[in-house]
Amino acid sequence: MSHMETSFYQQAAQAELEKIHSAALTPRARMAITVQDMPCQDPEVRRHNMQEVAIGYTREQAMLEAERCLQCKNAPCVAGCPVKIDIPGFIRKVKEGDFTGAGQVIKQTNLLPSICGRVCPQEKQCQLPCTVGKALGGVDKAVQIGRLERFVADYEREHGLQTVPHAGPSSGKRVAIVGAGPAGLTCAVDVRREGHDVAVFEAFHKAGGVMVYGIPEFRLPKALVASEAGLLESMGVQFEMNFLVGRTRKLSSLLKEDGFDAVFIGTGAGLPKFMDIPGENLVGVFSANEYLTRANLMKAYEIGKAGTPIYPSRRVAVLGGGNVAMDSARMAMRLGAEEVRVLYRRTREEMPARAEEVGHAMEEGIIFDFLASPTKVVGDDKGKVAGLEVLSYQLGEPDESGRRKPVPIRGSEHFVPFDTVIVAIGNESNPLISRTTPDLHVDRHGHIIVDEKQKTSLDRVYAGGDIVLGAATVILAMGEGRRAAAAINEVLQ
């Protein structure tokens, strides 16, 4: 986006602010304020770069959007937030122009606001029950809580106003956190606040989990993740990188030999699922996990400089309809593919991906083949992908999730040429910890079984995030990390 376009948003918001500040606003008048659009890079420009797509609100836009909040006494938005941010409280501060105060309110319960403001599905959580959205007939008309959270966090960082959470007096207790993803980092903060010593054990060389290996740079800049994870180090949290619990050291050893008083497992769901169709072993078929990890964590897009190669692609098929599928498709486009198609068995209405991400993908030229799914990966005489045999579908009756079932249309198989296939149909739990830890109970999917306080079947061992939930969201994982931390702090007192 050009400076001129940003200036347009700024001036339009400023003009409306001046108008409404000259009169006391009634609830009806607040609901008449226009929802503030998010300034973004032009699609034709951004599809060729790795810079962040959404540019963020201007100061004037943030204050104007905050004016839309009715400050409901029952605060339905807070009930929709997995970490229970005082949303009316921080928005009130934004409306007053007290952005530092807004940040302090948010950080009472959420240390990762830059991240949550960018990648959380607010339309399914805090914004879904918003009174304004319900009154105006759609969640897209709700107060834009996520955009305001992002603005506050960015304002703090850009003006050097970030503060380090206070760690209490030393308790002499030690807690091990397995996995430096959103669940682990959140648990680490809340435990450290109580004065316990905290050590985080991470299998990769960078902290952040899915936030660094899964979510692309153009949606979540990695410098933000490093910055917010760095706050934990400032609190005294220790990080042990390239440390794979279950292989480098068993979980039981952390408790028995290393003397930790409690352990939290937040290892995520990093084992990719495949479709189990013929040809998935051909050269040119990738799990979304591998493709995105190479591109994000290892920066394969820096051709000639990166520590890993990336497969050269012209025509790419992405299988799936979630956020990971959108990330994979948009990344493939940025890595030079001439054509990228997303194949999904249902229609756009049933896609689990965020509407904003689907819209951005379409703007960038990604093609969507709805009501279609492959039955076979077809190879050439060199063992490489040549294309897909694709079956067409129609929608039948709703299933247990409420979405209509895709029903195959007999005889509709047809061949579509591709040279690369990315499978983005979800992940399962890595079984390493459960297989090396006797008596740790898991369900048939390999998810660790916990009680209402996130306690596992083992004494002093807790778990949360995707290793418990299956592939979920950053904010849900954080909510589980907070709940586990509360239980650990209670026990260690």
Image: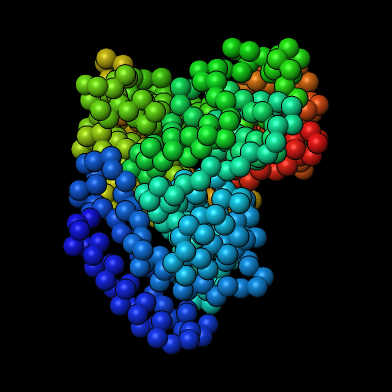
Q: Determine if residue 158 is in view.
A: yes
- Above or below: residue 24 compared with residue 142: below
Q: Is residue 96 shown left or right of residue 128? A: left
User: At 45% across and 56% down in the image, what residue appears?
Assistant: 152
Q: Is residue 110 shown left or right of residue 333? A: right
- Percent from the top left, x then y, of residue 71? 58, 73
Q: Residue furthest front?
A: 169
- Above or below: residue 186 compared with residue 74: above
Foreground pick, 487 / 351: 487
- Quadrant of the image containing the C terminus: top right
Q: Determine if residue 392 is in view.
A: no
How did the renderer colour the structure? rainbow
- Percent from the top left, x then y, of residue 246? 63, 16
User: At 33% across and 62% down in the image, what residue appears?
Assistant: 58
Write down the quadrant of residue 260 in the picture: top right
Foreground pick, 105 / 139: 105
Write down the quadrant of residue 443 in the picture: top right
Foreground pick, 486 / 386: 486
Q: Is residue 136 shown left or right of residue 79? A: left
User: At 70% across and 26% down in the image, what residue appears?
Assistant: 174
- Quadrant of the image containing the N terminus: bottom left
User: At 47% across and 74% down in the image, what residue appears?
Assistant: 68
- Percent from the top left, x then y, of residue 359? 35, 55
Q: Residue furthest bottom?
A: 23
